[in-house]
Amino acid sequence: MNESGRELPSRASVVIIGGGAMGVSSAYALAAAGVRDVVLVDKGPLGSGSTSKAAGGVRAQFSDRVNIELAVRSLETFDAFAERFGQEIDLHKPGYLFLLDTPAAVAEFEKNVAIQNDLGVPSRMISLREAAELSPLVDTEGLLGAAYSPTDGHCTPESVVLGYAGAARRLGARLLPNCAATGVETVDGRITAVLTEGGRIETDTVVCAAGAWSAPVGAWVGVDLPVTPLRRQVLVTEPVPDLPPTAFTIDFGTTFYFHREGPGLLLGMSDPDETPGFKLDRSDAWLPRLGEAMARRAPALMETGIATGWAGLYEVTPDHNALIGVAPEVDRFIYATGFSGHGFLMSPAVGEVVRDLYLGREPFVDVSGFDARRFALAGARPELNIV
């Protein structure tokens, strides 16, 4: 019996480790495909890991074709989410605006926009005047260009988890929060069980959707999942008087970003001095650099107070691209992790991919380039549009 007092199933067709957006999306997709005895375990409440700390951005402006295809499919699901799952996710689509301040960035985004357009994404390069209209708080001095897509936006990650979890349970999946996995049993290269704090679950298939905690899960079965936890911090301002409609704005050169959050703004930025580790406390060390970026790019925000903030974990891989595949080292170990900050937004599509990998079907997109072994084979696949 686990901490929530529920009986632990003795057997499962598949055990998913990780109850964030990726895990619950996979559980739903498997159950909807008719897979019986789907079980998901998580060490805490569902969505309480990186998902609940995400900024909630959903976009299709990537540089890698597969990422664009995964994002497009996911955006379609987010658009129809309330209708399909009976769960409002507070989806807003003011578009994503990337601000570019070097010739190299402009050239790269021009190339990326062409790929995105080829895949049906209505992104485009825009003038600085239009950028200022889309994001009135921005000072365009020093910028050389901008890219914008009107179908991008943001929604509430916890609501997406609720929607998938409810749908998965209605289809017979067993979701067990507060029941940490502690190991995976194997015999002669085959999975035989998942060990948890609440007991042993016999199974021949494991899905690792453990996000920043994936490396040790892979190690249980001898699979190298090169995922590093890296703290990222988010702040929410006090109400901004007369706040105009504002695109989700990213100053690409500094990674400073902001979007509307109720009567204020949610904002964040990467910290190049951040060191790897499972750090979830807030630190002030990044604030001077954030202040510099704000003063240059959105000076009006310097007068706005901070109401709250939090820290979460990115699950970073060496090339900032995902790890998706079926491990050859052990039979029936599927992984979907390492999204380097865009796992939440791709979770609907990746759940479908996990389902197809489990069923031995061809996924709607070729994810073979995301095989975790690519680094050993010198085949890194860099995703450039990471903030």
Image: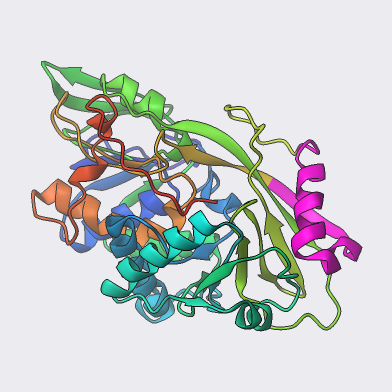
Q: At 30% from the left edge and 24% from the top edge, which residue is drawn?
A: 224
| Image position, residue 215 (x, y; %) | 39, 27
| Magenta segment boundaries in residue numbering | 283-310
Magenta stretch holds residue 373: no
Tell me what residue is drawn at x 43 percent, y 58 percent.
Answer: 108
Q: How is the image coloured?
A: rainbow
Which residue lies at the image location 31% right of the left edge and 42% below the top edge?
Answer: 381
Q: Is residue 49 left or right of residue 283?
A: left
Of all residues, the one furthest to the right in this rendering is 303
Q: Indicate the quadrant where residue 278 lies.
A: top right
Q: Nearer the viewer, residue 5 or 153?
A: 153
Answer left or right for 136 relative to 291. Answer: left
Q: Is residue 365 left or right of residue 86?
A: left
Residue farthest toward the front in the current orientation of the protein:
103
Residue 279 occupies quadrant: top right
Front in this rendered view, residue 317 or 277:
317
- From this viewpoint, is residue 122 visible? yes
Relative to 37, say whether 140 is above or below. Answer: below
Q: Position of residue 363 (x, y in %)?
A: 16, 57
- Image coordinates of residue 64 in percent, x first then y, are 33, 55
Q: Is residue 172 visible?
A: no
The foreground one among 356 and 255 is: 255
Does 284 lie within the magenta span? yes
> From the viewer's perspective, is residue 328 above or below residue 142?
above
- x, y (%) of residue 148? 51, 74
Residue at left 43%, top 78%? 82
Q: Quadrant of the N terminus?
A: top left
Question: Looking at this view, is 112 or 273 the one in front?
Answer: 112
